Image: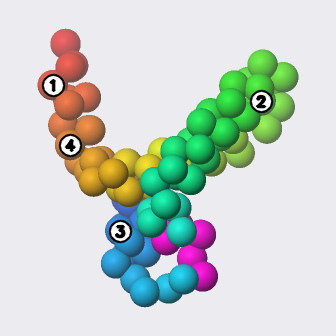
Amino acid sequence: MKILEDLILTIRNRKNSSSKESYTKKLLEDKELAQEKVEEEIKELIEAVNKNDNKIHEAADVLYHLTVYLEANNIKIEDVLDELEKRKK
């Protein structure tokens, strides 16, 4: 889980950086592009699962793009995790 924490911190650092070269920063600043990438990556993951090929790579892409999308829309992963905790039975 440390890698997920590191990813979140990196995304948040990119959000506050002035770098124009960062792909992450570009996604954070363009919510429409971020949404398009989440949709694209989910489709690619579904295709990979159906073909039983490249599933891990595509799943990683989905996690990355979803995390960026959440951050771009001021949805904190901590709040999402809290919601999941509430749903435990």
Residue 64 appearing in the image: no
Residue 86 in percent (x, y) is at 15, 25
Residue 75 in percent (x, y) is at 28, 48
Residue 18 appearing in the image: yes
Which badge, 3 or 2, is on the more N-terminal residue?
3
In the orientation shown, which residue stands out farthest toward the top? Answer: 89
- The kind of secondary structure element at disc 4 is helix
Q: Quadrant of the C terminus?
A: top left
In the orientation shown, which residue stands out farthest toward the bottom? Answer: 18
Q: Is label 1 in contact with label 2 (beta carbons under 8 Å)?
A: no
Which stretch did the figure color magenta?
21-25
Label 4 – label 1 distance at C-alpha: 11 Å
Q: Nearer the viewer, mark 4 or mark 1?
A: 4
| Residue 56 to residue 53: above or below | below
Q: Which residue corresponds to mark 2?
A: 48
Which badge, 4 or 3, is on the more N-terminal residue?
3
Q: Residue at 20% across / 43% down in the picture?
A: 79
Which badge, 4 or 1, is on the more N-terminal residue?
4
Which badge, 1 or 2, is on the more N-terminal residue?
2
Q: Is label 3 in contact with label 1 (beta carbons under 8 Å)?
A: no
In the orientation shown, which residue stands out farthest toward the left? Answer: 86
Q: Which residue corresponds to mark 3?
A: 12
- The kind of secondary structure element at disc 2 is helix
- The kind of secondary structure element at disc 1 is helix
> What's the colour scheme?
rainbow
Q: Which residue corresponds to mark 4?
A: 79
Q: Nearer the viewer, mark 3 or mark 1?
A: 3
The amino acid type of the residue labelled 4 equals: Asp
Residue 53 in percent (x, y) is at 83, 31
Q: Which residue corresponds to mark 1?
A: 86
